[in-house]
Image (tube, rainbow, N blue to C red):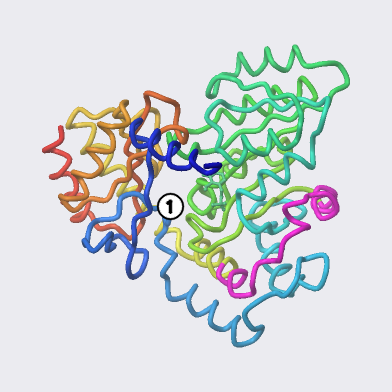
Amino acid sequence: MASDFIQDDLQALKEASLYRRLRLIEGEQGPIVTVDGHTVLNFCSNNYLGLANHPALREAAKEAIDRYGCGSGASRLISGNMALHEELENKIAELKGTEAALVVNSGFQANTGILSTLVGEGDLILSDALNHASIIDGCRLSRAKVFVYAHCDLDQLERGLKDAPQNSRKLIVTESLFSMDGDEAPLGGIVSLAGTYGAMVMVDEAHATGVAEPNGAGLVAQLGLGDGVLVQMGTLGKALGGFGAYVAGSSALRDLLINRCRSFIFTTSLPPAVMAMGIAAIDLVKREPERRQALRDSCEHLRTGLKDMGFTLGNSQSQILPLIVGDATQCMKLSEWLLEQGVFAQGIRPPTVPPGTSRLRITLMATHTLEQIDQALKVFKEVA
Ligand SMILES: Cc1ncc(COP(=O)(O)O)c(C=O)c1O
């Protein structure tokens, strides 16, 4: 039959230990969750600040529904550009210290849309080897040539810039805080090389937004590199506890995206409640620096505990702690065993990470208590 390949593909995934299935979370997203009927510690959420179930975000969403209704009814360029979209955009621009910002429906859509807007056939994208799937797909969609440089390797990046065809547009794209490794890109070096070779820079702040000082603005702001970065993008669905994404930069960039970015143009705009959550989250992050501090303290506690047991956690100094196992089958066995012991730490396998580097991607939330972390450390001790 024409569809036999479906069963064959699934079987091949199972044989390679790469088959994935959805786990069911009942109730709210918190430090403790019910997964497939078992109540466990949640050590693999991107809800880093614990805002996904925060009363301020719930209230903001409810008020927005009461005032503006549920749906936006159309794309932004038709009749779906509502007051809350622009209010959120102004708030993001203020937070990031940029001239303007544009809300896009998701980080995935932002990355595919931005890249294919800024470069095309005959141009060159220089992309870190560990960039997110949405960046990889954006590169493909753009039809530009792609030079993949080894993770955080400035020498290779420079070689790629030197070899770029004359008169081609050049765009360097990197995550600021890498999603699966928790380490930081050498942003200062990247911006400086971009200046030397006349390249544009795009930084994905998905995992630094809400978390990195000052005020959760991200690493570009922290390092004072805003002037050297053409595009800062990030998501509202991780530390900010809601959904959606943003692009921050110049007014001209915003204008161009409104006119050319297909994933912005050809989709119904996000509903008012989602915008209201984003606004409430940014206010909350500014107002409560203690959340970011609590996250840092908890991560340090867990990191020290795991390192003392002999685990290696790469170069991460952040809320993302990669415990590398290597083999995909072993990684998933460990993840299942931990779940049985009450610790939910999802195993991450190829193609999300390179072959041979399957890992537990352990993440914490500001709302985990030190007792909960100690409880998990006891379980990890048995693994060690
Ligand atoms: C680095 C990075 N960029 C982009 C995205 C996509 O963001 P969103 O979840 O808003 O689609 C993610 C996460 O899913 C990510 O980790």
Q: Quadrant of the C terminus?
A: top left
Q: Which stretch is magenta?
A: 251-277
Residue 127 lies left or right of residue 15; in this view the side is right
The verdict on residue 272 being magenta is yes
x then y, percent, for residue 319: 39, 44
Where 5 falls versus 283 (above or below)?
A: above
Secondary element type, mark 1: loop
Residue type (three-letter) at the residue carrying disc 1: Asn
x then y, percent, for residue 69: 64, 83
The verdict on residue 291 being magenta is no
Looking at the image, the residue that sits furthest to the front is 1
Residue 105 lies left or right of residue 82; in this view the side is left
Q: Is mark 1 within 8 Å of ligand 1?
A: yes
Q: Residue 66 falls in which quadrant of the image?
A: bottom right
- Answer few, some or many: residues within 10 Å of disc 1's Cα (few below 14, many 20 plus, some between 14 and 19): many
Q: Residue 166 falls in which quadrant of the image?
A: top right
Residue labelled with disc 1? 46
Residue 316 lies left or right of residue 1; in this view the side is left
Seen at 82% across and 52% down, the residue is 251
x then y, percent, for residue 81: 77, 70
